[in-house]
Amino acid sequence: MSVIRHDWTKEEILDIYNKPMMDLLYEAASIHREHHDPNTVQVSTLLSIKTGGCPEDCGYCPQAARYHTDIEGNDLMSVQQVKAQALRAKSSGSSRVCMGAAWRNVKDGPEFESVLEMVRTINKLDMEVCCTLGMITENQAQRLAEAGLYAYNHNLDTSEEYYKEVISTRGYEDRLKTIDNVRKTNVTVCSGGIIGMGENVEDRAGMLVALSKLSPQPESVPINALVAVEGTPMEDEKPVAIWDMIRMVATTRIVMPKTQVRLSAGRTEMSREGQAMCFFAGANSIFAGDKLLTTPNPDVNEDMEMFSLLGLIPQKPFVKKAQPETVESADSKFESMGEKPKWSRPDHTIERNESAKNNAKKAVADK
Ligand code: SAM
Ligand code: DTB
Ligand code: SF4
């Protein structure tokens, strides 16, 4: 039985990543079979509950207000709207709803209370609930846990070194701090990253070092291929080669044997054969639904056809961990702290982010 290691070095991970493809696939698939049913894939549906207008400068993100991309922004959805979407996701075979908000961090107040109610509502539909709301404090993580949250997604995105080339408005340390805050609760951790942002293979390995060091390792690791959106600083990045995706998935599987590896953004560019190789290499989760947060994703029916072709079965909810109990807001043990956490603001300059911002400003002025 392969052991769980938290001391992987970048060199060891690079050696795995660069193995001959057939050796890499064989090793990853063997480890996958030791820890998981290779014919079961967990299916999550993403729901953007608050879209666009984000103050951060994440170079990959169409929701950063400063790049003026062509997306439709929206205020926070209502609990009823979210419930209707969750029911749709359930009927299409999803076991989990992942609610995303274009926030830098969570602020205590009516909007957070509303998100807590969304969590209670979806948990009562017997679906796993995940949130990705930006940075959160320990108190906020506890309150989400009490509402019945199953998972919290907060990606490291890339290596600590390359992070400085992607985002200038927040630090890697704060990402780790949020993950640590989630770990202090019963909520499972979902954390991964993006390939295709101009990083090198050492950065990909560096991200896997940082993720595998977490103890316990994240229950779920999304591997996204960059969706290069016009207007963002990364609009001209070249599409990720399928071979890179397969190598990244296989390496993630080997260094984190127990985690669910999620084949995330970028599936519209992948053939069924390519995705099948990713599943063989250890991917055992996907985002389903015709939209990710703001960009397209394969049609659910096409995904279900692919599942049937490959003999894959959607994972039932709560098989990896028992369903959390929901505590009603009137019975909550925790108070809203009204706290203003001091998340860092490194605010160094990233040339391509600055020029994308200036181009966007100019385009608005020229209109
Ligand atoms: N605002 C919150 C945050 O940043 O943590 C939550 C939402 S954010 C959109 C969630 C994740 O989506 C990011 O951390 C990033 O990994 C991924 N993401 C965003 N834009 C992407 C893109 N264009 N291509 C691939 N992944 C992307
Ligand atoms: C993750 O790692 N990928 C998802 C989810 N977690 C929140 C988001 C992908 C977003 C892709 C760009 C968009 O649709 O806006
Ligand atoms: Fe905002 Fe999250 Fe997008 Fe960064 S990734 S700009 S924090 S929505």
Image (cartoon, grey):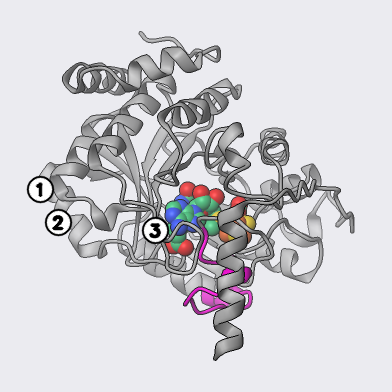
Q: CA distance from mark 2 to mark 3?
A: 32 Å
Q: CA distance from mark 1 to mark 3?
A: 35 Å
Point out which mark residue 309 bears: 1
Image coords of residue 284 (percent x, y): 32, 37
Residue 132 makes an appearance in the image: no
Task: Please tell me in which quarter of the rendered image ligand 3 is found.
Answer: bottom right
Amino acid found under the numbered disc labelled 3: Asp
Marks 1 and 3, the one that precedes in the sequence: 3
Which region of the structure is painted magenta? Answer: 61-81
Secondary structure beneath dot 1 equals: helix
Residue visible at 55% across and 65% down in the picture: 356
Image coords of residue 129 (percent x, y): 53, 53
The majority secondary structure of the magenta stretch comes to loop
Give the side of residue 337 with respect to residue 166, left or right.
Answer: right
Q: CA distance from mark 2 to mark 1?
A: 6 Å
Residue visible at 72% across and 56% down in the picture: 105
Residue 275 painted magenta: no
Question: Which quadrant of the structure image shows residue 36?
Answer: top left
In the picture of the structure, the residue carrying the numbered disc 2 is 305
In the picture of the structure, the residue carrying the numbered disc 3 is 236
Secondary structure beneath dot 2 equals: helix
